Every structure is written in C-alpha cells, then in structure tokens.
C-alpha cells in the first residue's frame, strides 16, 4: 500500500475513537483493491478454517472486526446463536492486508470458512472466481425479505450473470456535512445539487478570515476518488461502459471534472485530504465538507451544539442522484458442505435479525449503518448515545444507500479491472490535476489513455 492510506488507517483510529475506532477497515478505500486487483474499497481480515468438510455442527466465521471490544460483542452474539441453534461457531479475525494471503492459504489447505464478513473487493474477486455461493446469498436475502434492503446496497452485491455474490450487511456513506445556521444566515439552499454546492462554496469562501468555502479531496489519494465519484455518476459519467471499454474521456466525464475543478477553487490552500475535511469542519474553519458518516462520532464528541447545527446532504444531483459509500457483506463459501452452508445461512440470518443486528451495528455508531430499512427506522437502532444526538439526520444517512454507487459497477456488471486503475491512482490523479487548474478535456483524454494502457485496451 502506498500513498497516505496506510498512515491514515492508523491515525484515523485516534481521530475517530468516539465511534469505537471507526472501522478504518471500511472507511478508507483502495487498500484491499490494490492487493486483489479488485476495486474501490478496503476492509480487514485474518486466518481461519472450516476444518472437516462434513456436517453442520461446527462452522467457521471470518470477521474483519479486529478490535478487542468488537470481538467481545461478536463472541456474545455467537454464544447466543450456539445456544439457540446447536451449532458451534469458530470465529477468526483477520487484518485487512492479510486477507489475500489467508484466503490463498486456506484454499490450499481446504480450510476456507463457511461464512465471512468483508467488503466489496474481496467479494468481487472471490465471487467472479466461483468461490462464493450465490444460492446461499439468495436464500438469506429472501428469508430476511428482499424488500427490506436498500436497493443500492443490494445492487452492489449483484453478480454479472444474475443473483448476488453475497448478502449486504452494513456500511458507511459519504455526503456533504454543513453548518445549518451558517447556510441559513447566507440564504443558501441545501447542498445537494451542483449549483447549490458551487454557490455555497463561493459565498462562504473568505480566506482572509481563515474561512474556506468547501473541502473536497484534491490530493492524489483514494479520498479524492471517493469525493469525485458521485459528481461523475450524477452526470451519467463512468470509467467503463457496459462492454468494459474505458470511457473516461466522455463528454459527461469532462463536464464532471470541469465542475470539480471550479469547486476546488474554494478549498483550503494545498492538497486536501480527509484530514483537512475533518479538522476544518470541527475547528469551524469550513462549514461545508464532503466526508463519510464517521464524522458523526467526532461531531458528537465536540458537543451537542455542533451536532444540532450539522446537516447532512446524502447525495449529489445533476442529471440524477448519486452517493458514494462502502458496503460490507456476509459471504458464504461454496466449498462448504451442504450442512455447513445451511448452518451458515441461519447464522447470517441470526446476525441480521432484531437485537442481534442492532448490537452489531452499535459496535461503531455512524460507521456501521443498517442496510435494512426497518432497522434504520427502528427505535432499537436509534437507542444509542451517539445516534440519539443526531435525530432525524439518521434517516438521511441510511437513505443514501438507495443511491450508493461505485465506478466498478455498470448495470449489474462488476469490473475488477478497476483495481488496475485505482492502484495507480489514475482517477485521483485526474481529480488532483483539475483541482490545480489543468484543462478538464486534456486531463480526461490523457488519463483515459493511461487507463487503457493499465488494463490492456
């Protein structure tokens, strides 16, 4: 892993300790994609096994939650499942950067788990390789109730040939956080549309007073790609078309890059990262920042006044609405015996039902958001010290899952080759260049050429 991502994954645990470590595994994109050649995100994992291929009296569960406090919660959930279902669950925790090696080792020794909790990149890689059970995912989704899931979350687990590689379990979303009182004082609209965002950034930008109009990612990092994604997608722009050809130099993409360059004029000096967004918002040097739902913990720590005065715009809109975020899945391995898969399905249903699901989500309030609409609306989920402070904002956060999108997905098809582009930070480089004032059309053309070379087109 290069760039500032590895350092961020360590420091962000301190920055976001108000949300229990804030699961850097799912908050920073790109690390695991670089290891898998897969895509847009990062998650965490460790070694485990499904020793003995017969019977369903014991299953192995891999989880990406490596923090001790979270492991204690999961152990309690497992204990409850074991007592009610008579199936033993062997939990194995894994660090993100160890996951590819662990999977390779487990494949070689025939000790893959029955079910595992990880993000979209490993899901894509393993699913496209035939290692995940789509029938198990379908059974769990149908049993829980397909209509209960947010459409965007389900879409990201869809397999190209139909069905789903995995069951979406939880996730985080990104959008624009803003100081409600400041926007109101300046007669500014809610910052969801391109026009509203640009107008707010212009109006609020007062660098001589140490006040900046907006913070979006402008440094060549994964954060810049994350910030730019909903602008591109809201204008109908993609990296790939449905045939898998690079279309980064399309008219729609040039328009999105051009607009992003205009917006970047009103950011703080230098190249901005997630740290800039977090710090300037909390220090009240900027009243409009693009950031993930992990900001909730930090704002709550800053006090109820800041929380009450903070609004969340869950999508960017131009021709259509688009949001960015991460979905963490429950993936069932097809190598497991029929009996173990049956037990694994019941275990997944158990984790996503009632109080069990809420206990899991409360391990990282704001970082782990429900992908099930009834849970998002339930009083049980809202009954948490951090979440209570946010009131109706929770509805906006969960609702963003309806419009969540990634560059690696096109009309139900996933393109793991995106990893070969994101590993080289080619999208982020385009963003950084237009933020520095380079011509959008030239940037799109030159970056598209680099992308075609990266994927062999």
Image (tube, rainbow, N blue to C red):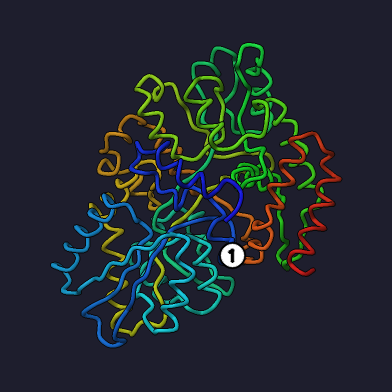
Of 408 and 323, nearer the camera is 408
Q: Residues within 10 Å of mark 1 (few under 14, many from 20)?
A: many
Question: Where's the C terminus, which quadrant?
Answer: bottom right
Which residue is rendered at x = 65% and y = 24% of the image?
201
- Mark 1 lies on residue: 38
Residue 410 picture location, percent across and down: 64, 61
Q: Quadrant of residue 293?
A: top left
Of 421 and 186, nearer the camera is 421
* Residue 75 higher or lower than 165, as above or below: above
Q: Is residue 404 left or right of residue 332?
A: right
Q: Is residue 85 left or right of residue 455?
A: left
Q: Quadrant of residue 134?
A: bottom left
Under circle 1, the secondary element is: loop
Extreme bottom residue here? 54
Which residue is rendered at x = 31% and y = 58% of the image?
352
Residue 191 picture location, percent across and down: 59, 29
* Residue 116 higher or lower than 287, as above or below: below
């Amino acid at each position: 892993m290069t760039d500032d991502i590895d350092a961020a994954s360590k420091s962000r645990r301190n920055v976001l300790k108000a949300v229990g470590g804030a699961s850097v595994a799912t908050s920073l994109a790109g690390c695991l994609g670089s290891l898998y050649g897969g895509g847009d995100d990062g998650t965490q994992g460790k070694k485990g096994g499904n020793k003995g291929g017969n019977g369903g009296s014991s299953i192995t569960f891999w989880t990406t939650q490596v923090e001790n406090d979270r492991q204690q919660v999961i152990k309690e959930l497992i204990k409850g499942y074991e007592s009610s279902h008579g199936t033993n669950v062997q939990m194995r925790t894994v660090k993100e950067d160890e996951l590819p090696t662990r999977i390779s080792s487990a494949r070689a020794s025939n000790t893959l788990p029955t079910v595992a909790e990880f993000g979209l990149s490993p899901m894509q890689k393993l699913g496209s390789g035939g290692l995940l059970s789509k029938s198990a995912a379908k059974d769990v989704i149908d049993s829980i109730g397909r209509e209960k899931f947010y459409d965007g979350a389900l879409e990201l687990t869809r397999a190209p040939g139909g069905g789903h590689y995995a069951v979406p379990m939880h996730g985080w979303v990104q959008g624009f956080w803003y100081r409600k009182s400041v926007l109101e004082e300046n007669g500014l609209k809610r910052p969801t549309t391109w026009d509203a965002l640009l107008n707010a950034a212009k109006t609020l930008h007062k660098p001589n007073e140490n006040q900046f109009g907006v913070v979006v990612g402008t440094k060549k990092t994964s954060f810049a790609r994350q910030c730019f994604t909903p602008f591109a997608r809201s204008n109908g722009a993609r990296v790939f078309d449905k045939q898998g050809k690079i279309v980064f130099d399309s008219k729609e993409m040039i328009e999105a890059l051009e607009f992003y360059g205009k917006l970047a004029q009103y950011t703080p000096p230098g190249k901005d990262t997630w740290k800039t967004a977090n710090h300037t918002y909390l220090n009240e040097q900027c009243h409009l920042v693009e950031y993930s739902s992990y900001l909730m913990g930090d704002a709550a720590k800053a006090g109820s006044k800041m929380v009450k005065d903070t609004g969340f715009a869950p999508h960017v809109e131009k021709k259509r609405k688009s949001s960015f975020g991460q979905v963490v899945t429950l993936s069932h391995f097809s190598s497991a015996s029929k009996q173990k898969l049956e037990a694994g399905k019941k275990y997944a249903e158990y984790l996503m039902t009632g109080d069990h699901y809420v206990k899991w989500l409360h391990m990282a309030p704001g970082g782990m958001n429900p992908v099930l609409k009834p849970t998002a609306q339930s009083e049980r989920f809202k009954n948490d010290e951090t979440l209570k402070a946010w009131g109706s904002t929770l509805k906006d956060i969960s609702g963003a899952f309806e419009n969540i999108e990634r560059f690696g997905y096109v009309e139900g098809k996933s393109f793991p080759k995106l990893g070969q582009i994101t590993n080289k930070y080619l999208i982020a480089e385009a963003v950084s260049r237009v933020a520095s004032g380079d011509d959008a059309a030239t940037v799109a053309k030159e970056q598209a050429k680099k992308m075609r070379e990266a994927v062999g087109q």
